Amino acid sequence: MSEPLHLVLVGGGHAMLPSLAHAREWTDAGINVTLIDPQRWLYYSGMVPEHLGGVYAVDDIRIDLRRMARKAGATHVAARATALDPETRVVTTGEGKTIPYDVLAIDVGGVNPALPDAAVGTKPIHRVRALRPHLNQVLDAPTETLGLTIVGGGAAGVEVGLNITGRFVGARRAADLSLTVVEQSGKILPGFPEGMRAYASRLLRERGAAIRTATTVDAVHGTDADGTQVDMRTDTGEHDTVHPDAVLWSTGAVAPPLLRESGLSTDDRGFLHVTRRLRTPTHPRIFAAGDCGTIPELDLDKVGVHAVKQGPDLRANLDTTLRRLAEDGSAPVASDLTAFRPYPVAPLLLSTGARRAIWTAGPLWTARSGFLRLKHWIDRRWIQRYAPEQWGAVGWRSLMGAEAASNPDVTE
Ligand SMILES: Cc1cc2nc3c(=O)[nH]c(=O)nc-3n(C[C@H](O)[C@H](O)[C@H](O)COP(=O)(O)OP(=O)(O)OC[C@H]3O[C@@H](n4cnc5c(N)ncnc54)[C@H](O)[C@@H]3O)c2cc1C
């Protein structure tokens, strides 16, 4: 009798969830499935800003990867993959364990470039939670204050800033928060519509936040006396040092070194080349999806919208590959696999820490309470799919009731 096939999933990110949810069918068919991820929980990035804003409790926004694996009859190896060998078909973990595979799917996301030890990272997303105790400690104690520097004024940094300022305003503690957004380029939200940028800037400033554009953070040091020291410099060469209590590092993603070190083809940032079939061009048994993959002809932004949309295609292509290998030992040709079709323009919904969300797609944008309801409905429905104990039944009717629980006192 031949050995059972072994499917190894490296990284249980947003794009991997449909495969993990489907894995029971593979294990029932006698295929061994292993998930390698050091984290037990995947935090849904769309809900993290509102978690920091006090809208959602931690259990509302996370998915238990270990439990999903167990339910599927798969093995969860709680370790970091440190090496991928595409020739011998082996994954090595940080503990030195070697795990052979027949088919490999990679969804390890990106990492923050140059993340200083003294800063809280945003990639992988679970790191952001380290900020929450700072917020709770201050909000629970009327005499405490919080100094927070957010490095990076892109969509993630701004959405987090809006939610945290909204929460302090809602708690009538705006004076106890000193929040600064530092952005390297000349404007926050680079690449987004001008009006949306002006709207978000106005909200932040009205709530007491400072925005420093054309400013680069050179170093962040942890200090015993002052919490954290942030050294920055403006484009005109002026240097400044601030001492916030916490620093959130929300700069764009770079690739984990593991990908380039595997010898597989990568782009110049180190993200894995994949075709529209989410398969590496050279190794037909290796797939990648989400932020860690790059489809050269599409050159997509590293956002969860694409990762989530790729999830079902990844699952379908793994399924086809496993079936073909079981049938005749060969990998399927490209035309037998599902091609990923991205949104023509990726839509984005950003919560504002008040009763509205900003909707944007390409040059268009608007901010409406209806979009916050829509965002809550979409987010809850998504979580509920993988954590059915959460949110009960999120049917279309709940769209009407899924209004902002957050900060009703915050005006816009
Ligand atoms: C605050 C914030 C808000 C955001 N909001 C939005 C939004 O509203 N909409 C949107 O489209 N995008 C949003 N994003 C971007 C979004 O988070 C990412 O694009 C998305 O998480 C990418 O998903 P992924 O599947 O590539 O991997 P991820 O979801 O990042 O998951 C990667 C997984 O791989 C694991 N892993 C990492 N390294 C290894 C390793 N070596 N071995 C094994 N496992 C490993 C990690 O533990 C993690 O579980 C936001 C980002 C931030 C920071």
Image (spheres, helix red, strand yellow):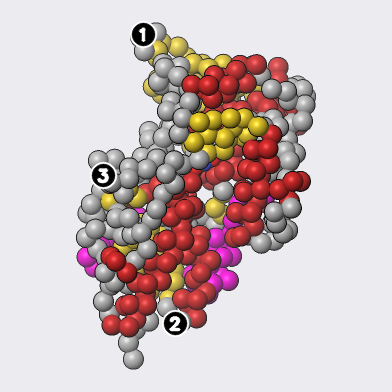
Q: Residue at x 32, y 87 (%)?
A: 2
* Magenta range: 60-88
Name which of mark 1 and mark 3 comes first in the sequence. 1
In the image, residue 136 above or below residue 271: above
- Dots 1 and 3: beta carbons under 8 Å? no
Residue ID for mark 3:
267
Q: Position of residue 84 (x, y in %)?
A: 30, 59
Mark 2 touches mark 3? (CB < 8 Å):
no
Tell me if residue 74 is in the magenta stretch. yes
Q: Name the residue tied to disc 2.
A: 30
Q: How dense is the environment of label 3, judged by Cα within 10 Å: few (below 14), some, or many (20 and up)?
A: some
User: What's the CA distance linking mark 2 and mark 3?
Assistant: 36 Å
How far apart are the two marked residues, 1 and 3, measured between alpha carbons? 33 Å
Residue hosting label 1: 236
Residue 308 seen in the figure: yes
Tell which circle, 2 or 1, labels the residue nearer the N-terminal end.
2
Q: Does the CB distance between marks 2 and 1 fall below 8 Å? A: no
Image quarter of residue 269? top left
- The amino acid type found where label 2 is placed reads Gly
Q: Nearer the viewer, residue 94 or 99?
A: 99
Q: Relative to 94, does residue 135 appear above or below in the rendering?
A: above
State which quarter of the image contains the N terminus.
bottom left
Q: Residues within 10 Å of mark 1 (few under 14, many from 20)?
A: few
Foreground mark, 1 or 3, reads 3
Q: Amino acid at mark 3?
A: Asp
Q: Residue 321, percent across and down?
A: 34, 72
Residue in the foreground of this view, choosing between 148 and 352: 352
- In primary-sequence order, the first of circles 2 and 3 is 2
Amino acid on which the number 1 mark rests in the picture? Thr
